[in-house]
Amino acid sequence: MTFDPNQSLPQEEVDERVQTAIDENEVVLFMKGTEMMPQCGYSERALGLIGQYREEFETVDTLESLEEFRGALADHSGWETIPQTFVNGEFVGGSDVLAELDERDELEAELAG
């Protein structure tokens, strides 16, 4: 599949992808870029924080249809910012919240669900 930055996915398709990712994964990170190539510092930070405590978790690249992902995620979390982390279907937060949890030694337990 080629990436065309001027194309976006239908909102219904993005809504379904977000719902499926949240429902089917214990931990899911919606981020800019991929696990191998994060495309923003906040996404990279969130990826690293989760990776300290979890070997297996799902990532979803939102750059494929950024505005539609922002809308779909806002419906679940009330936030439009990316990255966003969900654990067992519940919104945890972005990279700043993950960092705060880590500083308080609560991130590992949070990611364990």
Image (cartoon, rainbow, N blue to C red):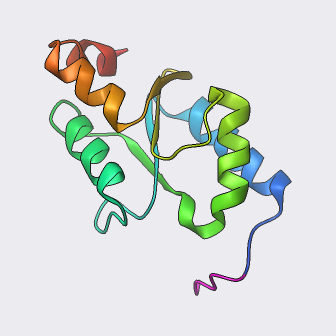
Q: Position of residue 20 (x, y in %)?
A: 66, 40
Q: Does the magenta run of residues contain 5?
A: yes
Quadrant of res 52? top left
Left or right: residue 20 compared with residue 45: right
Q: Position of residue 93 (x, y in %)?
A: 44, 28
Q: Does the magenta run of residues contain 53?
A: no
Q: Position of residue 72 (x, y in %)?
A: 72, 43
**Tally of marks:** 0
Image quarter where the C terminus lies is: top left
Image quarter where the N terminus lies is: bottom right
Q: Main secondary structure of the magenta part?
A: loop
Please tell me whether residue 101 is drawn above or below residue 42 in the rendered image: above
Residue lying at 63% horizontally and 86% vertically, measured from the top left: 4
Residue lying at 25% horizontally and 12% vertically, measured from the top left: 109
Q: Position of residue 18 (x, y in %)?
A: 65, 43
Region of the chain picked out in magenta, as a range:
1-6
The one nearer the camera, 7 or 12, is: 7
Left or right: residue 85 compared with residue 104: right
The one nearer the camera, 40 or 87, is: 40
Residue lying at 66% horizontally and 52% vertically, measured from the top left: 69
Please tell me whether residue 3 is drawn above or below residue 94 in the rendered image: below
Quadrant of res 97? top left
